[in-house]
Image: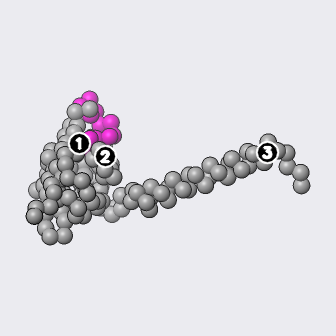
Amino acid sequence: MNVPLYEKIWMWASGGIIVAFVATVLVTGIGGALQPPSHVETIDPTKVFTDPRFAHPGVSVDANGATVVAFGMMFGFTPGEIRVPAGKPVIFRMTSADVTHGFLIVGTNANTMLVPGYVSQFTTVFKQPGEYLIVCHEYCGLGHHLMAGKLIVEAAKP
Ligand SMILES: [Cu+2]
């Protein structure tokens, strides 16, 4: 079979693009530990404040790491300042009390959507102590650009 040169080039280029896309998914998923949120857990968004899972937002720290319970709401995160230990697994459990918000800790792989009606959960480790900016990256209304928080990663105490 005689395949013209240009057709060969396009076939190889198409194959190369497919390989690049699959490699991107594998590198970010396995290498960068970026995964879509698991745990399909539902919640009534009108009852976030009284639901026992979110009635006391905050951070609880134990020997194994920390658990952050937080929610997003126009136009802020509760709690607005989160303190976690460095180098230990931190479990984030979050939801939204109104519309869809985003939760991104800039410079880390912590990134999820806060969808009303659902609980988003993920675990990550912050290796570098310091202050990180938390932003909402899903347009949620007129005050969207003001929706920010702070994460403080504290070095392990000697
Ligand atoms: Cu928002």
**Is residue 5 among the parts visible in the rendering?**
yes
Which residue is located at x 27 percent, y 47 percent?
Answer: 105
Label 2 to label 1: alpha-carbon separation: 8 Å
In the rendered structure, does residue 99 fall within the stretch colored magenta?
no
Mark 3 packing: few (<14 Cα in 10 Å), some, or many (20+)? few
Distance CA(mark 2)–CA(mark 3): 43 Å
Task: Name which residue lies at 14% across and 46% down.
Answer: 81
Instruction: Specify the principal SS of the magenta part.
Output: loop
Q: Which residue is mark 2?
A: 107
Which quadrant would the N terminus be assigned to in this image? bottom right
Residue in front for this viewpoint, 97 or 17: 17
Residue type at mark 1: give it.
Leu
Q: Is residue 158 left or right of residue 12?
A: left
Residue that label 1 marks:
133
Q: Which residues are magenta?
A: 133-144
As displayed, is residue 118 above or below residue 143? below
SS under mark 3: helix
